[in-house]
Amino acid sequence: MSEDYKNMWKELGLDLEMHDALLEVLGKGYQDVFLSQKNRPEGMGYFDFVMSEVHGLRIKELMDEKKGGRKIIGSYCVFVPEEIALSGNATLIGLCAGADFALGEVEKVLPRNTCSLIKSTFGFKLGKVCPYLEASDMVVGENTCDGKKKAYEIFAEMVPNLYIMDLPQMKSDQGRALLKAEFYQFKEKVEELTGKTIDYPSLKTGIKTVNNKRRAIHRLSGLRKVDPAPISGLDALLANQIFFYDNPARFTESVHKICDELEKRIEEKTGAFASGTPRILISGCPMAVPNWKLPAIVETSGAVIVGEESCVGERGTRNLTDESGGSLEELMDAIIDRYFKVDCAIFTPNPDRLSHIEEMVGTYQADGVIHYGLQFCQPYSMESMSIENALKARNIRVLRIETDYSMEDAGQLRTRVEAFIELLK
Amino acid sequence: MSEDYKNMWKELGLDLEMHDALLEVLGKGYQDVFLSQKNRPEGMGYFDFVMSEVHGLRIKELMDEKKGGRKIIGSYCVFVPEEIALSGNATLIGLCAGADFALGEVEKVLPRNTCSLIKSTFGFKLGKVCPYLEASDMVVGENTCDGKKKAYEIFAEMVPNLYIMDLPQMKSDQGRALLKAEFYQFKEKVEELTGKTIDYPSLKTGIKTVNNKRRAIHRLSGLRKVDPAPISGLDALLANQIFFYDNPARFTESVHKICDELEKRIEEKTGAFASGTPRILISGCPMAVPNWKLPAIVETSGAVIVGEESCVGERGTRNLTDESGGSLEELMDAIIDRYFKVDCAIFTPNPDRLSHIEEMVGTYQADGVIHYGLQFCQPYSMESMSIENALKARNIRVLRIETDYSMEDAGQLRTRVEAFIELLK
């Protein structure tokens, strides 16, 4: 890393020693998991570059944006509407929450029975190793699950620019009214932060930009329907992860470039894995960078992942925001409608999620579903049993995994995953 | 038990063998925990009788009420407004959730990492041993914590007359609007169930009845301020537990009778424990019958419990509903205001709870606080650390306990509680 980056990190208040240690682990993990894959599309070179510069060039870009008067908003959830941030002259960035860090410090302020994602959020702050968090002019927490909702109360003491967005628990009229009030309040908050009024043209542009990013991901997902799958699940997951970090327009263009290549591979019947490889759908909790444990195990155990029913995956990206509204109010309503459809397990009841899983099994010709739950994540844990029962009733094979970010159970997981894949052959 | 009861239980669909086993354990537990206490007020005889008939006479009363055209509504939470139920010609009853039952069956449908209270709710249903649940014409579930919210989705498959009440997560204008909509919907639901329209006079009467019950408990609590405390924490907890089961008017009268006796004891300086006994405030998760584990350990380890900051305690009863409203709408607003004040840990932020704990420590001259958390209860677990820090900063001693309904950790708990009490001397 260049001296420039070191100075930038120092100015952001990072702990350089810890941060170096993190980058080393991250780099090695990336090497082991991604660069060791065979038959990768060439276009993945772009994402390899993004990942190699994820705390470097991308942060420099954000700092340059800040110098130019733009604001950076950090978020931990797909419920924070990027359309509103963009149209208010702000860049929305997904914050680091995919690896254990400073666990000893974390467990001084959070109960042990807290999921890895939340512990990671705290670890990156307490360890001072997340340049995205430190570069953010505002950080948005959301009342999704109990764990996050209550943890943000403690997080607020460490992150003075934390803004809390409330969310409904039911898809009722009152629930929608609550979301509407919150999104309008968020719009005002963004305007206050950036000094820019969000108007009809800017919101329309914001919606189009985010939709285009989603459309690119839809195109990528669509190409995974064929056998042999032209791209590994790991690489597709990476694209879904970088969705939260990269410049939107450049991301969209890069994904389309990969898709052009994948279409050629499909014509030539070139796959990331051999034709006939068992096809797995992953469903459940989000996987943030660098949480690649389970997919890496699956794809080195003789199966290919063909879809992610996840916030970092189709749950997060499948719905577009209607662009046709003729007024600011209509566009805001379209945004509210779009996010109100997200079938997160925090909603009760949440039947759309099961329908979506069943639909994805058909669309992507999956031979089985692995339900991925983070330990102590009550909403997904509770849904996992009903989902397992419902899928089994339709003769769809299911493996229910509950894990965390540690590597301690990797051997055990591999044994279970291998046995499951054997059943699918 | 008489043959009449057996027939009644059979008609309710109870598993008589399992139910007998439950009653035996319950009876023995009551004997060991309550009847072995020394220096009990004579008035507790009434509660001893209530407990001895908790699945007998009280159920018979409810069945008689049903024959007379009244409806029974079961609930699991202090957010369900009893005022509305009563004024709609229905009796509100707290349902069984204080003991492990049919755990093997429960863990087939619920994740292992679920709190004992929720597991117990399912256990009493799956084991067919809760006559209150089976006698209920409608059962109300509420979206409080993630665990309950998501578990009710599964519970609905076993309890076809389950009605879900949504709740807000923040004390915002939108949050209040949501609660208002839900309470009006509940009112309509009660009217639909009973065929009786809730009008101004009936609602006013309902409010007064519930307020009178609360006032009686306030009087009882107030008498616990003195040293020596005239009543044990166990007996006071029992009164708070029976609050949810008994006929409201009779309960009110019986509590006042005990208070008359306690006032005499105070004059005579007669305490349940010797003067100078270390005084403990319990704060945290609710304790439903027969969850007496922790209080029994505390009061046989040399301390007296002088207050419960709990839903089964002051959190549930401390606020009255304003009776002065001049119209149905004003009374409904008063009910909404009253319940919106409840400082349950499901709210974020929830500063009132800490203030209330601090206030209670002063009012009841507590020497220390035991924070009682159920394992896997995220909202209270998350708050417990901040509360411990805040109280310690005020030089108030705190012991943080996390447990479940099993007796496996009783020895360990006793050791910790004894050590804590030593510190208070």
Image: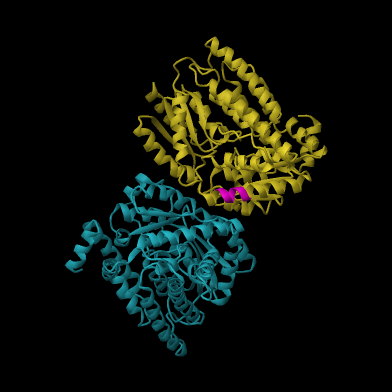
Chain colours: A yellow, B cyan
Q: Against A274, is B322 above or below?
A: below
Is B5 in front, or is A415?
Answer: B5
> Is residue A146 in sight in this rendering?
no
Is A124 in front, or is A310?
Answer: A310
Screen quadrant of the N terminus of chain B? bottom left
Q: Residue furthest top?
A: A268
Q: Residue furthest left?
A: B3
Q: Against B412, is A356 above or below?
A: above
Q: Residue furthest bottom?
A: B268
Q: Main secondary structure of the magenta part?
A: helix
- Position in image of residue A91 (x %, y %): 72, 38
A180 in the magenta segment: yes
Residue B161, quarter of the rendered image:
bottom left
- Position in image of residue B50 (x %, y %): 31, 73
- Position in image of residue A222 (x %, y %): 54, 23
Count how many numbered circles sit on residues in the image: 0
Question: Looking at the image, which residue is at 33% across and 78% down?
Answer: B46
B283 in the magenta segment: no
Residue A24, quarter of the rendered image:
top right
Q: Give the magenta range.
A: A176-181
- Position in image of residue A410 (x %, y %): 49, 33
> Is residue B60 in sight in this rendering?
yes
Question: Looking at the image, which residue is at 44% across and 69% down?
Answer: B199
Question: Looking at the image, which residue is at 21% across and 57% down?
Answer: B17
Is A80 in front, or is A107?
Answer: A80
Is B59 in front, or is B305?
Answer: B59
